[in-house]
Image: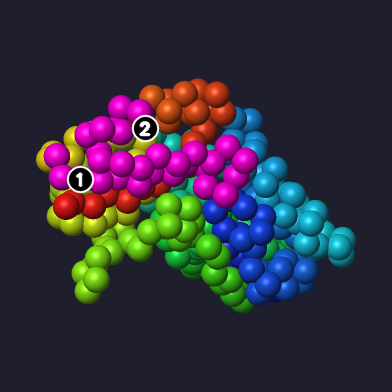
Amino acid sequence: MHKLSVIGIGAGDPDQVTMQAVKALRQVDVFFVIGKGAEKQELVDVRTAILAEHVERPYRIVEIADPPRDRAPADYQGVVEDWHERRAALLAAAFAAAEGVGGILVWGDPSLYDSTLRMIERVLARGTVRFDYEVIPGVTSVQALAARHRLVLHRIGEPVHITTGRRLREEGLADSAVVMLDGECTFTEVPGNDVHIWWGAYLGMPDETLIAGPLREVEQQIVERRTRLRAEKGWIMDVYLLRRG
């Protein structure tokens, strides 16, 4: 493999794939997909559906099993570093065996809470395989959330904070915050009766679910809906905006 394209494919709606992404897809000979088990097969299926719709030339798909990791570690940074290193080792082996142009389809955009670019740098640092790579931006779940709720993420002249559920628990809420990777429904721990929430799950997909309102009024509804959806599908991707005032 002499070149790799890291392609953002949007938050779940195949129509969110940009023309730049389509052009890149049509140059790829082999696509690498990191599988996450049978429960999350739908994530792989969406990727293959995008390829079937936009790519007419022959290509191969190489699926790589995602190595397991502790989801509630005491040393979060250390566990993630180890996980990335093991992922990089698997990718390096797959890249070395491939010919032509490779491609990795990234859910949303490679720049926002995604580890793909870090792992590619780890692969190159190993020195066992050499290639050039490009990054094609995609529509993020943050953009999709704002569009589906028809809202601006920040007030006039003010910032918006993008964070995780873990950091929200540690740092609290100042004003406006987009929260990702929150498997514990940390919004229920945010104090105050002046907080509003805009929540979305499976954005851009057939099972898309939206709930918005004063946090204290809708938080239990979100918790119950999220729990049910995750039990039914075996996985969930959700994101939300919190704002005071």
Quarter of the image with the N terminus in it: bottom right
Estimate the spatial distance between the alpha carbons at disc 2 and disc 1, rounded to whole Å. 15 Å
Question: At 54% across and 69% down in the image, what residue appears?
Answer: 137
The answer to whether residue 206 is magenta is: yes
Task: State whether residue 191 appears in this view.
Answer: yes
Q: What residue sits right under mark 1 in the picture?
A: 195
Q: What residue type is labelled 1?
A: Val
Q: Where does the image place residue 126, in percent across and percent down from the top left? A: 52, 64
Q: Nearer the viewer, residue 181 or 156?
A: 156
Relative horizontal placement of residue 53, taking residue 77 as reference (left or right): right
Q: For the residue carrying disc 1, how many other residues have a C-alpha within 10 Å: few (<14), some (14-19), or many (20+)?
A: some
- Relative to the observer, which residue lies in front, 102 or 214? 214
**Region rendered in magenta:** 193-221
Instruction: Return the mark for residue 222.
Output: 2
Image position, residue 31 (x, y; %): 71, 57
Q: In this view, does 174 lie to the left or right of 203?
A: left
Q: Where is residue 69 in the image (x, y as percent from the top left)?
A: 43, 37
Name the residue rendered at 35%, 63% in the picture: 152
Can you say whether 131 is above or below 105 in the image?
Answer: below
